[in-house]
């Protein structure tokens, strides 16, 4: 080989190396290394390893009921619904009963209050009537005291016992005795008997005098 050809051999080798380098890098990118595997392959392998060879996978059986069991379940649910409705009805009745009891207690308290007020009014009216009666008896006794015994006896004998008896006591023993003696015998005896049986405390003669 001539000296001129030997001189160009290194240059040709460098050029061949540069030409093969891109092809080698592309081959490296497109082809995965033999040690690395894709996730799909790993999942497939794990699934395959979970199932023994020669055996087929079987899905678990579903929960199916017989016709009798379905009928019993339906009746059970219907019974629960009826019990719930009855519970709600009983609860509503209990609430209504409690409300009625509260209303009754309120009405009873109001009635007791009204009764107390009515009794107080009746007592006040009775006391007022008694005070008015005593005032009229005192005034009548004052008028009869200025009359003659016969005239006073005629007027007083016509009055009911509720007025005549306390008026005689208001006149005092002296004037009352004269008026009683001037009355008819039967009327005087009845008034005297009433005076003895039912004494009525009234204003005396001295207290009745102005």
Image (cartoon, rainbow, N blue to C red):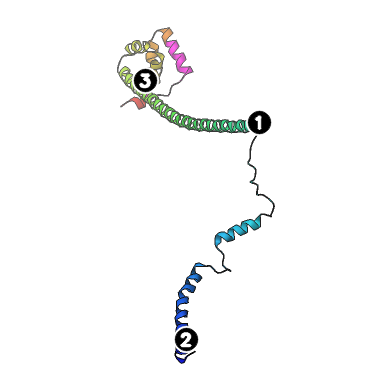
- Residue located beneath label 2 in the image: 9
2 or 3: tag closer to the N-terminus: 2
Write the residue at 40% across / 12% down: 181
Q: Quadrant of the C terminus?
A: top left
Residue 115 x, y percent position in the rendering: 44, 27
Frontmost of labels 1 and 3 is: 1
Residue 111 x, y percent position in the rendering: 44, 28
Q: What mark, if any, has residue 68 been given in the picture?
A: 1
Categorize mark 3 by other alpha carbons within 10 Å: few (<14), some (14-19), many (20+): many
Left-right relation of 165 to 83: left
- Give the extent of the magenta segment: 188-204
Frontmost of labels 2 and 3 is: 2
Left-right relation of 56 to 149: right
Write the residue at 47% across / 71% down: 26
- Residue located beneath label 3 in the image: 171
Q: Is residue 39 above or below residue 202?
A: below
Residue 41 x, y percent position in the rendering: 57, 60
1 or 3: tag closer to the N-terminus: 1
Quarter of the rendering containing residue 66: top right
Relative to the observer, which residue lies in front, 55 or 139?
Answer: 55
């Amino acid at each position: 080989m001539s000296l001129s050809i030997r001189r160009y051999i290194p240059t040709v080798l460098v050029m061949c190396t540069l030409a093969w380098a891109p092809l080698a890098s592309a081959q490296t990118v497109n082809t995965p290394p033999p040690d690395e595997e894709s996730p799909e392959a790993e999942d497939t392998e794990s699934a395959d390893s979970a199932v023994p060879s020669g055996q087929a996978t079987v899905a678990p059986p579903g929960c199916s009921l017989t016709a009798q069991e379905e009928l019993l379940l339906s009746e059970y649910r219907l019974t629960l619904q009826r019990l719930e409705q009855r519970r709600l009805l009983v609860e509503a009745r209990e609430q209504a009963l409690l409300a009625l009891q509260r209303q009754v207690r309120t009405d009873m308290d109001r009635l007791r209050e009204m009764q107390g007020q009515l009794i107080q009014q009746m007592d006040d009216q009775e006391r007022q009537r008694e005070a008015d009666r005593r005032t009229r008896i005192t005034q009548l006794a004052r008028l009869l005291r200025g009359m003659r015994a016969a005239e006073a006896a005629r007027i007083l004998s016509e009055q009911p016992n509720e007025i005549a008896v306390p008026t005689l006591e208001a006149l005092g023993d002296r004037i009352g005795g004269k008026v009683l003696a001037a009355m008819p015998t039967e009327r005087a005896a009845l008034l005297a008997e009433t005076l003895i049986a039912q004494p009525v405390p009234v204003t005396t003669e001295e207290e009745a005098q102005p």
